[in-house]
Image: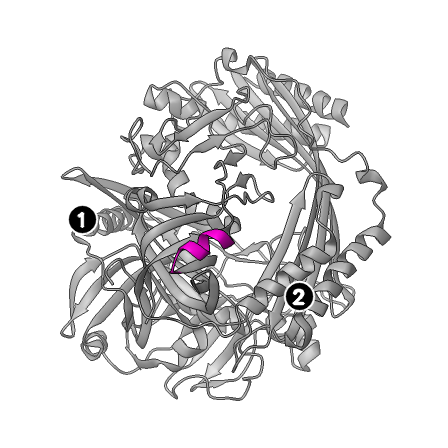
Amino acid sequence: MTSDGVKAEDVQPRTYLAATAVAEKNGKRERAGWNFGGRRDFSYFAPGLVEELAKTAVNRTLVLFDAVQPPAGEIPVVLGPGVTGVLLHEAIGHGMEADFNRKKISTYCTMIGKKVAEPFVTIVDDGTVPHQLGSINVDDEGTLGQKTVLVEKGILTSFIHDKISAKFYGVKPTGNGRRQSYQHYPIPRMRNTYMEAGPATPDEVIRAAGKGIYVEDVSNGQVKIGEGDFAFYVSQGRMIENGKLGAPIKDINIMGNGPKMLSNITMLANDFEFHEGGAGACGKDGQAAPCGFGQPTILVKSLTVGGTRG
Amino acid sequence: MKQELYNLAESGIQTAKAAGAAACRIGIDTERTVEISYRERKPENIKEASTKALSLEIFVDGRYSSMNTSDLRKDALKDFIGRAVAQTRLLAEDPFRSLPDPKYYQGRQDIDLGQVDPDYKTLSPDERHAFVKAIEEACLAKGGDKVISVTAGSTDGYGESLLMTSNGFDGYSESTYFVGSAEMTGKDEGDRRPAEYGVAVSFRRKALPKPEMIGMDAARRTLALFGAKKLKTETLPVIIENRVVARFGGGFLQAMFGRGIQQKQSFLADKKGQKVASDKLTLIDDPFIKGALGSRLFDNDGFAGKKRVMIDAGVLKEFYVDWYYSRKLGWEPTTGSPSTLIIPPGKRSVADIMKDLARGILITGFIGGNSNSTTGDTSIGISGQLFENGVPVQAVSEMNIADNHLKIWPRLVEVANDPYLYSSQRFPSLVFKDVVVSGI
């Protein structure tokens, strides 16, 4: 309830089931895991899903025994569908949160209406996707959850607003005024951020990369809002050699610059997926908020890969 | 308030026992914090929060649970504890869960750790605002026409904490804290807007540096990032600046915990007594340093604090093993968590060390990255300064180092003389040789 007349209530459930596996082979140990969840009730966690979870966690662990280190340097990077959308969230989405732009500390603050990507790139932040972690019926300022197009056909069209930033920019709030709990004040936060699919097949995208790496899963993403620089830890992936997937890779960092990466996206596949996980949360200003993300297979012309081979 | 906490904990233990618990541990924390931040010479945020929370660990029928509540009203707490005991009975048995043997509670020191500022209650709103304004002004002045935005802030607080068990332990502590901070974003070439921060934290207000120092430090660090470039991949010596050593060292530290060892997720599990780093590395866990941010008289199990040498001249001597994992591992417990960590400082300053290294990188910031506690593999983004013959010649960003903890710590060649005091991990700057720094 607010003094400007809003009366609203919302239930925002969150459940997840996670598994971690540790395996040993020839004296070497590897560990990996997976989780399923979201804004789900317990009927989602049927026996079939539990079995899939266990198999996924084990398979993701066993493949790591064959992992190699890619060479260090700038190479083409293919981001697989679904979970790698966290990179979109971190490297691009945060820079579009309007408080950073209102304070002129985001690299995107002068780019509304400008071309930031190729015309086949559309990025959306949507609070209305069923079961996704960032879905809300109403935000913490009483604005209804809604779909907000951030980049439309390559043009930056909107920031992510709470009421303060919307007033500053003279636009309607986008329903992104979120807070962790009663102890915190609402600030612009993403909900479910995703990039729409393109026309290519995933194989065509991998073929076009030629020689590079294919990223299946990432963790520990961080972005510097002002410079746009970001870094991600690749926990699962593959080498790409001669346009085909090769040996597994793991435990390397990829680095880049958000605006540069966005303009360097050269292909999108037709295999869009949301990540169906329920663990983890986005952190900002000391507040945690559950967010969803998704994307199709994406080819980025080049990113810095941190290997041990120079 | 202290007696009130004791009354509440004693009543909670009695209620749990009456509800059927075989044993229980109760922790109660209260805290008041005040935060102020300024931007464009105006207050940006002012926030005050007072919180109380109770954590309850129940042991019943060989089962265990841990629950929390912030509703400390008498009737509500009674209902909460009753439900907690009933819900614990629904869980699987865990034969390793119990309260510690009380012998580990013995030997607690009775010393003043210097964690309370006697003047805290006299701190006025005007003093808080003046402190933050001084930080902002100094940052604006030092940043000059390069400033896009400066946010200066102050946080202070007072907290009390009580831990009590049904088998005879009780421990109370109180502390105050003061934080001053500034973050500057500057206008660099093109659309780049580098940002860096300065921060200081202490139990006592008078132990903080002057606010001007905090503001100028933020500006100096931001300006140092201007013109940052990604360089060609090269194998170089690197110096990790004192205030970011903890982030890199955390990947090593996480493999020293009993949980990871018991679950076979530690690359150090079989390395006790072995050389895991160069002889330049000694790591001491010292809970008794007056005014240090990690100091304590007892840990979360109630174990009496004890100074421990965790790594001695590169040899791994101890792990962090709490009561539960000591039972699972069949080991003697140590403590479940670090107190104040020290790497004894060396003799030379970073500036002097840089003069001796013909060409290298001073790492002043990390970004992203991770460390695999099972294998020791680590990869992390860096920013900082390329230096030649002691002189910074180029700011660097979008670069990366990748290594394995068991391979890089033996390449630690020098420890600087500058321990970072605004952290419970009082680490000096560290120098590593032959590090692959990835770029173009």
Q: Nearer the viewer, residue A24 or B118?
A: B118
Q: In the image, is A228 to the left or to the right of B438?
A: right
Residue A206 screen position, x and y as percent? 21, 74
- Residue B275 in the image: above or below residue B150: above
Please tell me in which quadrant of the rendered image residue B39 appears. Answer: bottom right
Q: Which residues are magenta?
A: B351-359
Q: Residues within 10 Å of mark 2 (few under 14, many from 20)?
A: many
Above or below B146: residue B377: above
Q: Amino acid at mark 1?
A: Phe
Say which mark, if any, is on residue A115. none
Q: Secondary structure at mark 2?
A: loop
Direction from residue A172 to residue A73 in the image, left or right: left
Q: Position of residue B36 (x, y in %)?
A: 74, 56
Secondary structure under badge 1?
helix
Q: Chain of mark 1?
A: A
Tell me, yes or no, whether the highlighted magenta stretch contains residue B356: yes
Whether residue A38 appears in this view of the structure is no
Q: Position of residue B94 (x, y in %)?
A: 38, 23
Which is nearer the eye, B370 or B382? B382
Discs 1 and 2 lie in a common subunit: yes
Q: Residues within 10 Å of mark 1 (few under 14, many from 20)?
A: some
| Residue that label 2 marks | A142
- Which quadrant would residue B29 be assigned to in this image? top right
The quadrant of the rendering that contains the N terminus of chain A is: bottom right
Query: Where, by quadrant of the figure, is residue A310 drawn?
Result: bottom left
Residue located 55% across and 77% down the image: B188
Instruction: Please name the residue that numbered disc 1 is placed on.
Output: A65
